[in-house]
């Protein structure tokens, strides 16, 4: 899980993880677009790159899983460039689904 001393904005990371976790508990995967839309509003005011960075940190640490077309995305089955595209291209934001790992 998250620890305070090793990551940048741990409060934002915790908020994102909790948001994804609530949806996971309801058996719903969260799209990156949903995250961007939610965290763009007050009190957060994040830009899409902020959301992508937070999601990337949680993905890298193993707290969340990515899915594209019902296939789980891992560093073993996708290149770093492909994963970066999933996180940064607005045309893919609706299709990139995110789930909290247990």
Image (cartoon, rainbow, N blue to C red):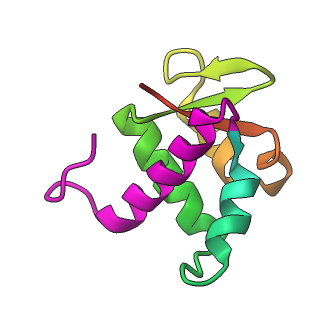
> Can residue 3 be seen?
yes
Estimate the x, y position of residue 26 in percent, counting from the top left.
65, 35
In the picture provided, is 67 more to the left or to the right than 3? right
Residue in the foreground of this view, choosing between 4 and 78: 4
Residue at left offset 19%, top offset 50%:
3
Estimate the x, y position of residue 48 in percent, counting from the top left.
65, 67
52 shown above or below 71: below
81 shown above or below 79: below
Residue in the foreground of this view, choosing between 101 and 95: 101
> Is residue 15 shown in magenta?
yes
In the picture provided, is 95 more to the left or to the right than 39? right
Find residue 84 and report its image quarter: top right
71 shown above or below 31: above
Residue at left offset 52%, top offset 49%:
55
Count of numbered circles in the view: 0
Question: In the rendered image, which quarter contains the C terminus?
Answer: top left
Question: In the rendered image, which quarter contains the N terminus?
Answer: top left
Residue at left offset 76%, top offset 19%:
70
Find residue 15 and report its image quarter: bottom left
> Is residue 78 shown in magenta?
no
> Can residue 9 be seen?
no
**Which span of residues is magenta-colored?**
1-29
Estimate the x, y position of residue 42 in percent, counting from the top left.
61, 84
In the picture provided, is 27 more to the left or to the right than 61? right
View extreme (right): residue: 91
View extreme (front): residue: 26
Residue at left offset 66%, top offset 75%:
40
Estimate the x, y position of residue 76 in percent, counting from the top left.
50, 16
């Amino acid at each position: 899980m998250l620890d305070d001393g090793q990551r940048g904005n741990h409060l934002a990371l915790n908020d994102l993880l909790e948001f994804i976790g609530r949806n996971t508990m309801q058996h719903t995967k969260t799209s990156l677009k949903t995250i961007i839309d939610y965290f763009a509003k007050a009190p957060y005011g994040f830009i899409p790159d902020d959301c992508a960075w937070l999601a990337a940190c949680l993905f890298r640490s193993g707290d969340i899983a990515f899915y594209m077309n019902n296939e789980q995305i891992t560093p073993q089955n996708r290149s770093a460039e492909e994963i970066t595209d999933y996180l940064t291209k607005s045309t893919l934001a609706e299709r990139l689904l995110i789930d909290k790992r247990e």
